Image: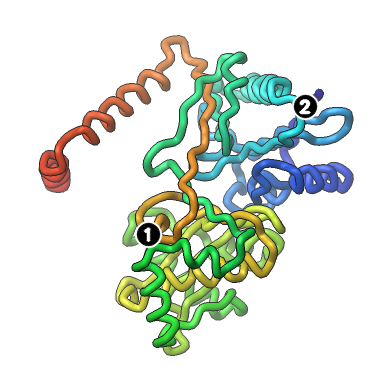
Amino acid sequence: MKREIITDYPGAELEKQWLEFLTVSNYPSHYTSPGFFKEPHWTNKSAFAVLILDDGKIVAAATGLRMGKQIVSGFAVRPQVCIDERADRREICENLAEAFLELAEAGDGAVERLVLNCPEQMPEFAEFGLKEKRATGGDEVVMLDLSRGTDAVFKKFSQSRRSDLRKSMRENLVQVSPIETEAELAELYKIHVDWSREKQLPADSWEAMQSIFANRDYHRIFVAKHDGKVIAGSYFRFFPRGLVEYSANNSMPEFQHLRPNDLLVWKSIEWACGENFTRYSMGGSHLFLRRFGGETVAGYRYSLDRTFLKKHDRREAVRDFAVKTYQSLPEAARQKIKRIAGRK
């Protein structure tokens, strides 16, 4: 095997090989595809991809960013490493580890940590010094199997979710559809800005929103309307006939009683089944998402702390111990801690 590191959209021949590989890979997502380089979010950031080739064919891909003193491929809820299951895993892991070390050495500043997030366990990474951590709790993801069709998927929803959706569809107070016009996008963007301000998060730029709207090869935006007015919108990434990912939602709080967000997800599932997608990642596992049924799956993170005293590993161990201790407390004690923290 050999490895290739690229920092820009690939040429035509490599693009073709990459897209062909994804059709047989274990995680064919937008961010494991060449489309990763077209995302407006990475403007002025050090985006890269590592491609592993065996006898001229791609058998693994990992995309990522240089983030300060860390080189990171994905997150627990959004893995960005995929492989051809038929290839030699040990050799893939060896080449990926060496490629990430090569990236670390090529930077201007000292890279303290390497992180690769994978959709499944790859223990072979341990042979090359990477530490394994299984995702737990909020870092797990609800995954829907779309191959069974919409009716079968709907039947797996919780009873309350099915009842709420049937009521909403019967009342027909909210209409959901893929976004079509820039006027609709402008309405949604205002909701996005207000939502971000309320959450104390930075809002995406209008130009970034326009770019996502225009890039229909890898994105869909669905909007919910009430009386002709946009009241909510949800954003989805995908690789054609591969994985659909629920990436974000913005909504107006005064219309939550109409359950536009439930309808947005359901209509996107209907669309995804109609487009022959195989899997649908909810992008998380909190209660709203779990009520859509599906299997809760855990990804695996492989990391290498390159600092002399392993400060990243030590800091994380302290944080994990604190979380585990908090979770072991009785509910009354946890609520008291939340009240005290809320007053600070």
Of the 4 image quadrants, the one containing the N terminus is top right
Q: CA distance from mark 2 to mark 1?
A: 41 Å
Residue 139 image offset from top left, x and y in percent:
43, 41
* Residue at image mark 2: 3
Left or right: where 16 falls relative to 5: right
Residue 169 image offset from top left, x and y in percent:
44, 82
> Residue 146, relative to residue 31: is it above or below?
below
Question: What is the image's colouring?
Answer: rainbow
Label 2: state its secondary structure.
strand
- Residue at 56% x, 77% y is 177
> Residue 197, relative to residue 336: is it above or below?
below
Count of residue discs: 2
Q: Nearer the viewer, residue 120 or 197?
A: 120
Residue 59 image offset from top left, x and y in percent:
77, 34
* Residue at image mark 1: 288
Quadrant of residue 170 in the image?
Answer: bottom left
Left or right: where 229 falls relative to 281: left
Label 1: state its secondary structure.
helix
The amino acid on which the numbered mark 2 sits, given as a three-letter code, is: Arg
The amino acid on which the numbered mark 1 sits, given as a three-letter code, is: Phe
Quadrant of residue 107 in the image?
Answer: top right
Q: Nearer the viewer, residue 177 or 183?
A: 177
- Residue at 32% x, 71% y is 253
Res. 46 visible in picture: no
Res. 89 visible in picture: yes
> Residue 319, relative to residue 94: is it above or below?
below
Of the 4 image quadrants, the one containing the C terminus is top left
Which one is earlier in the sequence, the residue at label 2 or at label 1? Answer: 2
- Mark 2 or 1, closer to the camera: 1
Quadrant of residue 65 in the image?
Answer: top right
> Residue 101, relative to residue 200: is it above or below?
above
Crowding at mark 1 (Cα within 10 Å: few <14, some 14-19, many 20+): few
